[in-house]
Image (cartoon, rainbow, N blue to C red):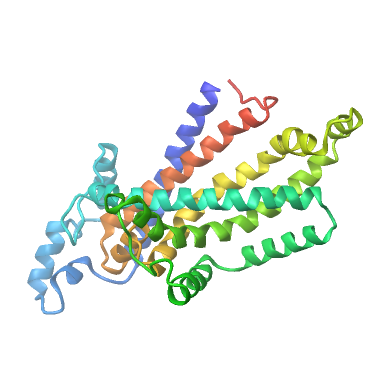
Amino acid sequence: MTRYLAGRLFHMVLVLCGISVVVFVMLKLTPGDPAATLLGVQATPEELARVRRAMGLDRPWIVQFGLWLGRVLQGDLGVSYISRKPVAELILTRFPVTLELTLVAMLVAAAIGIPAGVISASRRYTGLDYSITSLALFGVSMPSFWFGILLILLFSLSLGWLPASGYAPVARGLGEHLRHLAMPALSLGLFLAGSLARFTRSSMVETLAQDFIRTGRAKGLAERVVVYKHALKNALIPTVTVLGLQFGFLMGGAVIIEQVFAYPGVGWLVLIAVSQRDYPVVQGVVLVVAAVFALANLLVDVAYTWLNPKIRYGG
């Protein structure tokens, strides 16, 4: 296991380097000039040249990337072109907001999707099964921002129960904090719940047809014990895979949801940074999100050994 983890960590570093190169090149190919964004349309060519030189933008691309990578290896993500604040500080301010939103959305998805998939599989080919699979397909087909708009129309404009936008820190009260978090988390969670329900149902159907389940039933075990104690744990392996993979996609999807609800997370930060050509912020956010995504997938692989002790990794 130790050798396997070391190999995965080394592979993760290579992937992050590759992502950094791709993002850097894409930013350089994007139209726009950070110096012009900073100085405005009234800036003279001399002033623009001076600011570009101060930012290091007059150097060859490979030199710029090498200097950025060297600072990253020392734990320095650079300084924002616009706010002049350290990128790490900006990310640390916004990242907990997005991380909380993503984790709560995953909890919502798991709380809805896994039980729905289990019930659907154990009541296969009944009206309840068809209803759940239809709702799951509906959830997968609809984009998360559409759920967000529907929730705003229902809970904010019609019922007036929840605020339509904004963020409330915990210091303003846990209840107020959760009221602002509820709709963004539901929007992301409902989108993922459909996928989880479909994967859980497929896995449960396959597991319930295996010999050890038939043996349990032949021994007279209650159906509830067979389904929830013996079948569910084995069936959760592909579901855990989906959860791990979707964690990164949810953080990416938070970019749109944070915009819909004016939620001040990393997604909103990177969206503003792209519009302002604030390259260090974009590179820093992408690197951090990619690292979190890679770590989540590594944790998923480790979780396999807990769900199924027969799985062993080399070393």
Any part of residue 20 in sight:
no
Q: How far from the left and from the top, in percent, is residue 272?
A: 30, 65
75 to 78, vertically: above or below:
above
239 to 32, vertically: above or below:
above
Q: How far from the left and from the top, in percent, is residue 64?
A: 25, 52
Using residue 142 as the reference point, say whether residue 174 is left or right of it: left
Tag count? 0
| Residue placed most toward the observer, 260 or 302 | 260
| Residue placed most toward the observer, 147 or 5 | 147
Using residue 26 as the reference point, say whether residue 215 is left or right of it: right
Could you say which quadrant of the image residue 269 lies in? bottom left
Q: How far from the left and from the top, in percent, is residue 13?
A: 42, 38
User: Which residue appears farthest toward the bottom when viewing the image?
Assistant: 42
Q: How far from the left and from the top, in percent, is residue 91?
A: 29, 50
Using residue 256 as the reference point, say whether residue 40 is left or right of it: left
Q: In the image, what residue occupies the spot 27% across and 65% down?
A: 277
Q: In the image, what residue occupies the spot 56% across and 37% down?
A: 300
Could you say which quadrant of the image residue 265 lies in? bottom left
Quadrant placement of the C terminus: top right
Quadrant placement of the N terminus: top right
Q: In the image, what residue occupies the spot 35% across and 62% down?
A: 263
Any part of residue 173 in sight:
yes
